[in-house]
Image: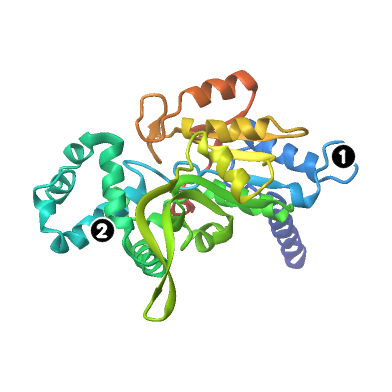
Amino acid sequence: MKRSFINVLLSLLLFASAALAADPLPSWNDTAPKKAIVAFVERVTRDGSTDFVPVPERIATFDNDGTLWAEQPIYFQFLFAIDRVKALAAQHPEWKTKEPFASLLKGDMQRALAGGEHAMLDIVMSTHAGMTTQAFEKIVTDWIATAKHLKTGRLFTEMVYQPMLELLAYLRANGFKTFIVSGGGIEFMRPWTEKVYGIPPEQVIGSSIKTTFEMRDGQPTLVRLPEINFIDDKAGKPVGIQMHIGRRPIASFGNSDGDLQMLQWTAAGEGARLMLIVRHTDAKREWAYDRQSSIGHLDKALDEAQDKGWTVVDMKQDWKVIFPFQRH
């Protein structure tokens, strides 16, 4: 009797383990978005399928802010820039009276950002340029290893979305090559994306400043200049994809109007396509925002997704957990 009970228990455990292993997206509820993802992957990878896509053409592009990791209350790269302003303030006494730096140093974020895009650009240029690429990489690496979110107290690299980590792994297991296509700085993301997302630096596309080659002390060096090179946002995203990848994606993932053109570019290709928008609807476990938000503004892209039948993820309804640290 005892042996029979143990055998039954072992069988149940093995069955449960097999069921868990069979689910590539365990943090997703069994709702329409998960079904759409699985159905799409099966269609494009199954031999004999009319929608079969050869491995080299299985390109998937992901926005970063608000799609792979959080972006509230402000983009994390901007928080990095603010920390750099504070670190460099002693070398720039003029910042005490010059905006937007003066307000930043006083902790008045609202006034610092009153200058809009120009103010943000001024801050980024002053903190991201004037150094070698190696020096900047080290600064980013050191910051990302210790910087924490003010609300959650978690490292920014812990503020990533568990369901999206599973999706990245699922796609790669099925022969997809996964790319980041973000409005964020390319050199800000590259030092850590491989460790956090499994996406190597050569598969990261982002905004950039100009870089020049110099010989310094007899050594070849790349130096970052305070000039815009490329903005990888909105209409810039399809351009960045063409320049860096040279293939049109068959799957794209975003969360805001800044991703609309990337999704449109993906949708315009032939054959099976997957366009997915992550909609922030969970004020309890994350943040709830879309049409009225200046960060992660989602309006036109949401309308187009609904009109054209793209997949829209409702965080509250479709995800069992949002962040890895919420798993039990």
Q: Nearer the viewer, residue 76 or 14?
A: 76
3D distance between C-alphas at marks 1 and 2 = 52 Å
Q: Provide residue 134's location: percent of width, then percent of height.
A: 41, 69
The amino acid on which the numbered mark 1 sits, given as a three-letter code, is: Ser
Residue 31 makes an appearance in the image: no
Q: Residue at x 36, y 69 (%)?
A: 135
| Residue linked to disc 2 | 84
Q: Nearer the viewer, residue 173 or 235?
A: 235
Most extreme residue toward the top is 307
| Residue linked to disc 1 | 49
Report whether 285 appears left or right of 194.
Answer: left
User: Which label lies toward us, 1 or 2?
Assistant: 2
Whichever of labels 1 and 2 marks the residue nearer the N terminus, that label is: 1
Q: Nearer the viewer, residue 38 or 297?
A: 297
* Mark 1, secondary structure of its residue: loop
The amino acid on which the numbered mark 2 sits, given as a three-letter code, is: Arg
Q: Which image quadrant: the N terminus? A: bottom right
Determine whether 180 is above or below 233 in the image.
Answer: below
